[in-house]
Image (cartoon, helix red, strand yellow):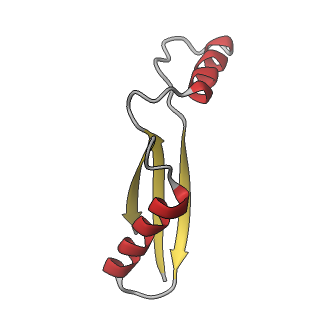
Amino acid sequence: MIKARITVTLKNGVLDPQGKAIEHALSGLGFDGVGQVRQGKVFDVELAGTDKAKAEADLKTMCDKLLANTVIENFAVEIA
């Protein structure tokens, strides 16, 4: 079994209204000094097998096809 974590974040320059809302909410809760907040997604995936190279290729394909909108998002794959 191969365990992986995929982190998806917005590319620089892409507006992040959810991040801005979180930033304002934190300020409203009294957390001073919070700079820019950017929101993202994390996927923990388990794959059958032991071939890490194949798993990494499959995970990147999953991101390209479904998990990330590569026009506006970046992704990173970490295999444990």
Query: How many numbered marks appear?
Result: 0
x 54%, y 74%: residue: 46
Query: In the picture shown, does residue 66 fall above or below 70?
Result: below
x 59%, y 25%: residue: 17
Query: In the picture shown, does residue 30 fall above or below 74?
Result: above
Front residue of 55 and 73: 73
Query: In the picture shown, does residue 50 fall above or below 74?
Result: below
- Residue lying at the far left of the rendered structure: 53
Quadrant position of the C terminus in the picture: bottom left
- Residue lying at the far front of the rendered structure: 71
Q: Quadrant of residue 31?
A: top right
x 48%, y 49%: residue: 8
Q: Position of residue 26 (x, y in %)?
A: 62, 19
Q: Position of residue 36 (x, y in %)?
A: 47, 21
Query: In the picture shown, does residue 9 fall above or below 56?
Result: above
Q: Position of residue 72 (x, y in %)?
A: 45, 40
Q: Position of residue 68 (x, y in %)?
A: 50, 53
